[in-house]
Image (cartoon, rainbow, N blue to C red):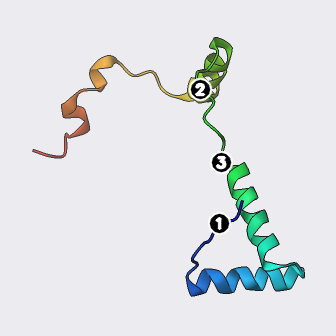
């Protein structure tokens, strides 16, 4: 597949500099950068399994045992905005 991409002068200069520094054609640098950018984005995985969900919750809760236990009454609108009237 061939695509045409318009680059601003700064991006073009940076791409040319990378290609020259690596001694490879400009097109190969652009192709590699595009592949790296696409690989770094994780594809949506859809639904989590129950085990994956529990693993995610455990990771979120890690270290929470050090948090103080607060009564439910501590979480009122007034407690969050007590300095505002």
Q: CA distance from mark 2 to mark 1?
A: 30 Å
Give me the residue at 52% from left, 28% from top. Answer: 67
Q: CA distance from mark 3 to mark 1?
A: 20 Å
Q: Which residue is mark 2?
A: 46
Looking at the image, which residue sits at the far left? 85
When the figure is inspected, residue 7 is found, relative to residue 34, above or below; the finding is below
* In this rendering, position of residue 11 left or right of residue 27: left
Looking at the image, which residue sits at the far front? 1
Element on which disc 2 rests? loop
Give me the residue at 76% from left, 65% from top. Answer: 31
Residue 58 placement (x, y as % from top left): 63, 22
When the figure is inspected, residue 9 is found, relative to residue 76, above or below; the finding is below
Residue 59 placement (x, y as % from top left): 64, 28
CB atoms of marks 3 and 1 within 8 Å: no
Q: Which residue is mark 1?
A: 3
Q: Which residue is mark 3?
A: 41
**In-front residue for pair 29/3:** 3
Residue 21 placement (x, y as % from top left): 85, 84
Please identify the quarter of the rendering in which residue 76 is found. Answer: top left
Element on which disc 1 rests? loop
* Badge 2: residue crowd in 10 Å (few <14, some 14–19, many ≥20): few
Image quadrant in which the C terminus is located: top left
């Amino acid at each position: 597949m061939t695509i045409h991409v318009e680059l601003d002068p700064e991006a073009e200069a940076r791409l040319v500099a990378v290609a020259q520094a690596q001694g490879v054609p400009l097109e190969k640098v652009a192709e590699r950068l595009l592949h790296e950018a696409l690989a770094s984005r994780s594809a949506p995985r859809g639904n989590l399994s129950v085990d994956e969900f529990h693993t995610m919750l455990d990771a979120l809760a890690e270290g929470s045992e050090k948090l103080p236990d607060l009564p439910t009454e501590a979480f009122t609108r007034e407690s969050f905005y007590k300095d505002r009237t």
